[in-house]
Amino acid sequence: MFGDDDDGVSGMGSVDIDDQTGEIVACHPGESLAQAQTRRRANDDSSSSSSTVRNLGAGSILSPGMIDVHTHVSQLGRDWEGYQTATLAASAGGITTIVGMPLNSLPPTTTLEALELEREAIAGTNSALYVDVGLWGGVVPDNLDTFEALLESPHVLGLKAFLAPLPPSAGYQAVSPKQLLQVARRCAAIGTDKPILVHSELMTQAECDENTKAAFANRSARSYAAHLESRPPQWEQEAVRVVCQAAEHCRMHVVHLSDARGCLPLIEQLKATYNKGGDNNHLTQRLTVETCPHYLMLDNTMIEDGDTRVKCFPPIRDVENRDLLWRGLKKGLVDMIASDHSPCEPSMRLIETGDFQSAWGGLSGLQYQLQATWTEAFARGCTPWQMAQWWSTKPAQLAGLARKGRIAPGFQADLCWWDPDFVGAPNSYSEEHHRWKGTTFFAENTTMRGRVLGTWVRGKLVYDGLRDAHKEPIGMLLEHRQRTMEPN
Ligand SMILES: [Zn+2]
């Protein structure tokens, strides 16, 4: 996992970390523990600083800390998970940065004022952060005249838009395709490098209502088949077409792609256009795509009627589509993975009645993303190096976190130490381990592969997986520090 090797083998090696800055100073691929100790002793003779050499053990992997660019956590407003428990859970899952979506806080972070309120609340005494936190802002019909100011704030890493209508209770409105294209053109005019993230399903509220009614007409409200039918893949394809058009003007990002069958050919076509300048052309990042562990791990045949823990939009589709998503991921058409952690108040999930029609949509389980991804990735012959691309390097690029996402000199020492061979229930599935009352996990009590042994944020251990113990909360609120990113 050192440097940019893509051989997929972590190999032996050592990393030097500056205790003061939390930065990686040097990487020594191939260096043994004894060699590292000898080198350290020699170096210490010429400097007064003491240094620690830690043996992480053969067979374990040191990856860049995972960066989860899609979490619904909010400090203000609702009875909803805040950043203290979310970052606690993240650290237990090997995640060293989470980026919060704009729409679950009240008010949503679609204005500079609302953003500052949320930031103040996060920075408040009751919200100790265990990992670093970044925030997306939002673009909605109401701020079409003012979104540029929000986008230019260093506290915003990019903006989230919806093409799909939301329920009124969400307090957040979708933009039209025409409005999205206007936004993209204005992003080009101000020359921003920050991305616009899009929930990519396109339909009107009336179409949505009609389709849901038809899908559930002769079926129980517990029917997963009806839920699946209520959100056809064509809606994703229509939205992705609009996002591709917008990518002509600025950086666009498709969040939580589910439909691979129809969408990936469209994405492939657009990416091929930008790839003409070679892989290092920065335009290759004009369009990025994310999917989630639940789309990669589950398909409709695995979901029981009434299991509303897995209700989400777009829905989890068929087995062949799941294979195609994996193919897209391996090919680089899907760039990254994120959790879409959505920890609503427990009663909103309607677990008792299993009512798919009325339950809140969104999955949770921030701390099990590594296992959820790796279990399936391993079975499909993928490597820890690919995991690091999907969960660290590419997400850091999306969020403009120029010093995160890689184990390389000059990068922050955000690290995840894990055992790729462990098979069992990850740590514990105990309630405490969920960290917040509203968190459920779709694969609870199932055997998965992988186990987090330790998580470091900027060189400091924040979670000791061997003891299941948390250390000092040293997470901080992140800023977009660098407008232009190195192509990678
Ligand atoms: Zn989401």
Image (tube, rainbow, N blue to C red):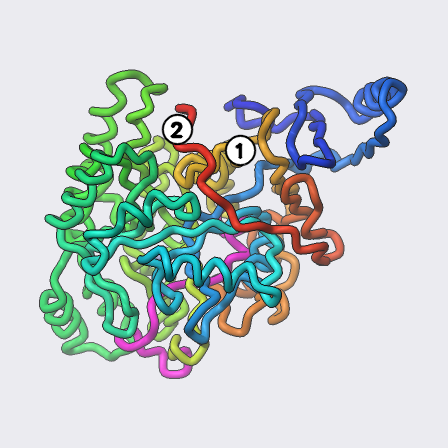
Please give the range of residues in magenta. 351-373
Q: Residue furthest right?
A: 45
Where on the picture, by quarter, is residue 101?
A: bottom left
Q: Is residue 204 above or below residue 407?
A: below
Q: Is mark 2 within 8 Å of ligand 1?
A: no
Which is nearer the eye, 297 or 116? 116
Q: Is residue 264 left or right of residue 21?
A: left
Quadrant of the picture in which ligand 1 is shown? bottom left
What residue is pinned by disc 1?
403
For the residues labelled 2 and 1, the Cα–Cα distance comes to 12 Å
Q: Which residue sits at x=79%, y=23%?
A: 36
x and y percentages locating residue 380 in the rendered image: 45, 39
Q: Is mark 1 within 8 Å of ligand 1?
A: no
What residue is pinned by disc 2?
484
Which is nearer the eye, 261 or 476? 476
Where on the picture, by quarter, is residue 261?
A: top left
Q: Secondary structure at mark 1?
A: loop
x and y percentages locating residue 34 in the rendered image: 84, 23
x and y percentages locating residue 332 in the rendered image: 35, 32
